[in-house]
Amino acid sequence: MDLHICGRVALVCGAGSGLGQAMALSLAQEGVKVAVTGRNQEKLDATVAMIHANGGQAHAWQLDLAQPELFDTVLSDITQHWGDIDILVNNSGGPPPATAAGTDNTIWQQQFSLMVTSLIQLTDKVLPGMKQRGWGRIITSTSSGVIAPIANLALSNALRMSLLGWSKTLANEVAAHGVTVNILVPGRIATERVNQLDTMKAKRENSTVDAVAEKSRQEIPLGRYGHPQEYGATAAFLASQQASYITGSVIRVDGGMINTL
């Protein structure tokens, strides 16, 4: 299927690995020019190399969401290199494990700035151009914890929930300008982050990583962890012309894992 986004420009945050990398690869496969961003230059270069090896177009820019004062410089460089940004994929790294009670207030504030405020600021910087051109896509990757809270991940559960309210409100505000705004929710996707969480859970439960993963698979109707490319393909579709009537939505890519309507 031709998604009719060939030649568009996308900025993908956290694209050096995991879900960010998967989304960057899928967009590039559709002919999108991808600005691969993140903190680790070596990982970013590896993503760019993968895209180039598959005939796609990509370039790496270091972009630390903890340094919003540098956003303008990076965005200016991207625009000069490829043109205005049509697709923004908001994707921040996962916070450290934490309980809802007893976590230091400084940690809450730091993580809110990194996971929420920074993404809102970045979005605000690319939105005017999208509105002016009458076309844009804002896709924000979150966590299944925004629907079914995950034990020991209170920071992620609480802070990413605020992105849902922001996204829905923004979707209504910019719909008339041809800009769609949606949330992606991953289930158990086979990434390094999920492996780290399985490892930590195994230690807490005095178990093994294999046992923890097997128990998780048994709780997923499809009986397996998702492939990163399946998540990336969903992001590419939300960026497509065919998805132009989907906005203000929360899309699950979870193999049926989240046991709520």
Image (tube, rainbow, N blue to C red):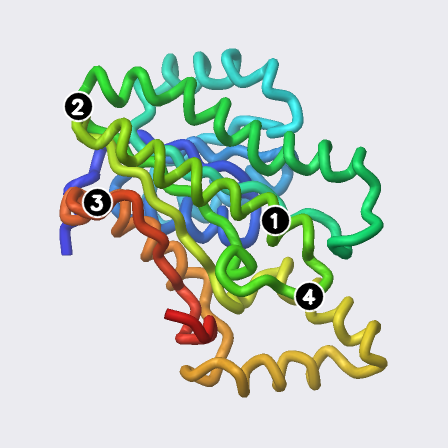
| Residue tagged 2 | 134
Ranked by sequence position, the earlier of labels 2 and 4 is 2
| Residue tagged 1 | 158
Q: Position of residue 9 (x, y in %)?
A: 31, 30
The amino acid at mark 2 is Gly
- Which residue occupies 60% across, 29% down? 65
Q: Where is residue 197 in the image (x, y as percent from the top left)?
A: 69, 64
Callout 4: SS: loop
Ranked by sequence position, the earlier of labels 2 and 3 is 2
Callout 3: SS: loop
Task: Using the image, tell me which numbered label, if any, was put on residue 235.
Answer: none
Q: Do the residues labelled 2 and 1 touch (CB within 8 Å)?
A: no
- Which residue occupies 20% across, 39% down? 5
Q: How crowded is mark 1: few (under 14 residues within 10 Å), some or many (20 or more)?
A: some
| Residue tagged 3 | 240
Q: Residues within 10 Å of mark 4 (few under 14, many from 20)?
A: few
| Residue tagged 4 | 151
Q: Position of residue 12 (x, y in %)?
A: 44, 37
Measured in 3D between alpha carbons, the distance from the residue under mark 2 to the one under mark 1, in whole angstroms, is 33 Å
Ranked by sequence position, the earlier of labels 3 and 1 is 1
Is 193 on the left-hand or right-hand side of 179?
A: right
Measured in 3D between alpha carbons, the distance from the residue under mark 4 to the one under mark 3, in whole angstroms, is 35 Å
